[in-house]
Amino acid sequence: MENLIIEYLLGRKSAIKETVIHPIITISRSHGCNSNLLTNMLIENLNESKKDKGPHPWSFVSKEIIEHSAKALKIKPTKVLEIAKPSNMNIIEDVVSAFSNDICTVKTKNTIKNVVKSFAEKGNLIIVGRASWTILQEHPNAIHIKLMAPKDWRIKNIAKKHEISLEKAKERVELTDAKRNDFNAYFSRTKSDEHVFDLTFNCMKLPNEVIVSTILHLMKFKKML
């Protein structure tokens, strides 16, 4: 009997050792910071520097999170974003949702969380936006990045990129910032959740090459590569 217990414990210990939590990166960004170019540069560098092949090459997701959530809820992606607002949350709905199959903010919130966590479980993944930084703040093998820049700089960047006037660019930046702030607030536990970020970069002052190099350096320091 004693030998059986020892074998069981050794087996459990071996199973725990074999469990590998592959790394992830989350990127939160202000509108006008070129996160797409930076993300692609980061992925290219990560795949070149990988010592092992891991489960799969590094990649990224963003809009896929809303698309998968909408599919699970059987509603349109635009409807998911309409529901996912902090102003829609209330205690009564929380209680009612426990006894109902209707689409509500609580169900939407939990669905998005589950989709984000499901993507994160695969590892070797960069998740851009979608409040991933706060949803995954307790992930044991993650780096959370924030990209920011002065508003005027971002407005000029958007105007140049989309070949529109500064006035229209200003409207776009303010509207997108407000939507992203609402979405983050929908999931954020407290106003001090921003302590989650490992690194915050000013995109006006730092080129993408420097940002990517710094992220890789931190990942090596944390033995994520």
Image (cartoon, helix red, strand yellow):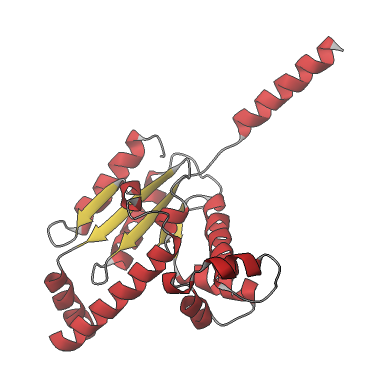
Q: Residue at x 54, y 74 (%)?
A: 67
Taking depth in this image into account, of 187 and 4 the one nearest to the observer is 187
Side of 117 where 172 appears, left or right: left
Q: Which residue ends up furthest to the top in the rendered image?
A: 2
Query: In the image, residue 129 lies at what x, y percent?
Result: 39, 64
Q: Is residue 129 visible?
A: no
Side of 34 where 86 appears, left or right: right
Q: Which quadrant is home to the N terminus?
A: top right
Tally of numbered tags:
0
Q: Residue at x 29, y 61 (%)?
A: 38
Query: In the image, residue 90 lies at what x, y percent?
Result: 51, 69
Relative to 216, does residue 113 appear above or below in the rendering? below
Q: Residue at x 60, y 28 (%)?
A: 17
Q: Is residue 148 visible?
A: yes
Query: In the image, residue 201 lies at what x, y percent?
Result: 22, 54
Query: In the image, residue 209 lies at what x, y percent?
Result: 22, 54
Q: Which quadrant is home to the C terminus?
A: top left
Relative to 116, does residue 83 appear above or below in the rendering? below
Which quadrant of the structure image shows residue 218? top left
Taking depth in this image into account, of 118 and 138 the one nearest to the observer is 138
Side of 2 where 198 appears, left or right: left
Q: Which residue ends up furthest to the right in the rendered image?
A: 1
